[in-house]
């Protein structure tokens, strides 16, 4: 799971209410609890670059409004959220390897 700094994010007045309403901190605590209960590892990874990096490692800069990830280096075309989730998984797995 991304190690999002919720406390720092709520300093942005425009986003604070949405972030608190979403309960991101509570969600992370719940996932951690469930992992511990099932004997699974809960790993936090650095969120830096997860939405701007391709699976091949190349940076692919794009605005938040762009929902499709297109890498010119390797030709990968995929939903940007799916690419980010795969990067988070890879970073987590590299921590336990």
Image: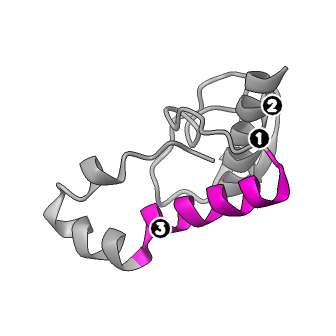
> How far is mark 3 from mark 1, CA to CA?
21 Å
Judge the density around disc 1: few (<14), some (14-19), many (≥20) Cα neighbours within 10 Å.
Answer: some
Q: Residues within 10 Å of mark 3 (few under 14, many from 20)?
A: few
Q: Disc 1 marks which residue? A: 89
Q: Is residue 94 visible?
A: yes
In the picture provided, is 13 more to the left or to the right than 74? left
> Percent position (x, y) of residue 88?
69, 40
Q: Which residues are magenta?
A: 22-40
- Pair 3/1: label in front: 3
Q: Is residue 24 magenta?
A: yes
Label 2 environment density (alpha carbons within 10 Å; few <14, some 14–19, many ≥20): few
Q: Main secondary structure of the magenta part?
A: helix
Label 3 or label 1, whichever comes before in sequence order: 3
* Residue named by callout 3: 26
| Marking on residue 93 | 2
The answer to whether the residues at label 1 and label 2 have Cβ atoms under 8 Å apart is yes
Which residue: 80% across, 31% down? Answer: 93
């Amino acid at each position: 799971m991304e190690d999002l700094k919720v406390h720092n994010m709520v300093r942005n007045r425009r986003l604070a209410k949405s972030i608190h309403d979403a309960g991101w901190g509570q969600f992370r605590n719940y996932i951690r609890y469930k992992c511990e209960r099932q004997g699974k590892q809960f790993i936090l990874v650095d969120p830096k670059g997860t939405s701007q990096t391709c699976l091949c490692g190349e940076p692919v800069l794009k605005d938040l409004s762009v929902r499709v990830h297109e890498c010119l280096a390797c030709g990968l075309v995929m939903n940007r959220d799916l690419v980010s989730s795969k990067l988070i998984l890879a970073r987590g797995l590299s921590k336990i390897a």
